[in-house]
Image (cartoon, rainbow, N blue to C red):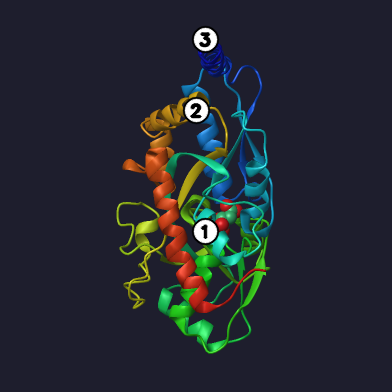
Amino acid sequence: MKQWIALATLAAVSAGAYAQAFPGNKPVAIVVPFAAGGPTDRVARDLAEAMRKQIPGSNFVVENTVGAGGTIGANRVAKAAPDGHTLLLFHIGMAATPALYRKLSYKPLEDFEYLGMVNDVPMTLVGKPQLPANTYRDFENYIRANAGKLNIAHAGLGSASHICGLLWQTNLQSKEAMTTIPFGGTGPAMTALIGGQVDMMCDQTTSTTAQIEGGRIKAFAVTTAKPLSNHPVLKHYPSLQEMGMKNFNLTIWHGLYAPKGTPPAVTKMLNDALKKVLKDSEFVKKNENLGALVVTDNRTDPAEHKKFVAAEMLKIKAAVDAAGKYAD
Ligand code: MLT
């Protein structure tokens, strides 16, 4: 019996010692499963800066691991050493990709420790600057007049931009489907849009707000149920619901994850720091300036975060199975 107590004590001490030592002088990588310059990357860089403030001496960095709608990056973290030095920032794709990729190389609910949710980000329907339309109605009429000739960019099957584009086109009931052009993220897609190489895209306000304000792209609508009437730039655009798309209401949630088996003392430290970040006025303001809202409800608790993702997975799987279209 004494041996067990000694072992248990040793384990507790070593876990506590590990947590005290964490993160030490080794960087903490926040893996973004999309290319640099996109909305997920934007949130991750602001999060890394804010987390550094909450854990003195820490060095949170962002690493982009691209491909397959974010599943390559998610798999990297699922298989990473569970030491707290490799985290994942992933959005609705965490729940959408298991429905689309039937041979997914990881299990979203079993292979990760859930560290809490970060923010909810609206999306915008945007077009290249040369598009001959200035209102949403013009935009729709132009699409109908050019059925089968236009293309829409996204960040890979299962990405937020892909999901939004699918939902919107289903509601549009356009005669012919548009050509879809995948990118490693909506960062590079935005460059192509600004350059006129692609016609349109549905992308998150964390990426589009600055481009709209700078007049480098055209905006036509937002995907939230109601217009973003409090935002100085985004308030000028109607919601798709106002434009007749009943029940269209899409915002992109983002969550933070670590590999399964990361020590509880470390996951608690990371979740505690995240909760303080979500109350950090500078981080909150950065989100608001880009049309995003930090999470203030119980989804910041790991257990509630996991419950939320599990429910989203069921919802999205039902829709994907009904459509019968898969990524693999
Ligand atoms: C998405 O479309 O899923 C994201 O916007 C991709 C990205 O962050 O680049």
Q: Secondary structure at mark 2?
A: helix
Q: Residue at x 39, y 32 (%)?
A: 275
Query: The residue under label 3 is which amino acid type?
Result: Lys
Residue 136 in sight: yes
Query: Residue 168, percent across and down?
Result: 47, 74
State yes or no: Cβ of the residue under disc 2 lies below 8 Å from any atom of ligand 1.
no
If the image is split into quadrants, where does the C terminus sit?
bottom right
Residue 133 in sight: no
Disc marking residue 264: 2
Q: Residue at x 46, y 70 (%)?
A: 318
In this rendering, the answer to whether 104 lies above or below 255 is below
* Residue that badge 1 annotates: 215
Q: CA distance from mark 2 to mark 1?
A: 47 Å
Q: Residues within 10 Å of mark 2 (few under 14, many from 20)?
A: some
Quick check: 33 left or right of 160?
A: right
State yes or no: Cβ of the residue under disc 1 lies below 8 Å from any atom of ligand 1.
no
Q: CA distance from mark 3 to mark 1?
A: 72 Å
* Residue that badge 3 annotates: 2
Point out the quarter of the image occupied by ligand 1.
bottom right
Q: Which badge, 2 or 1, comes first in the chain's sequence?
A: 1
Query: Residue 46, percent across and down?
Result: 51, 36
Judged by depth in the image, the label closer to the viewer, 2 or 3, is 3
Res 268 → quadrant:
top left
Q: Residue at x 61, y 79 (%)?
A: 150
Quick check: 120 left or right of 13?
A: left
Res 88 → quadrant:
top right
Q: Secondary structure at mark 1?
A: loop
Q: Residues within 10 Å of mark 3 (few under 14, many from 20)?
A: few
Query: The residue under label 1 is which amino acid type?
Result: Gly
Query: The residue under label 2 is which amino acid type?
Result: Pro
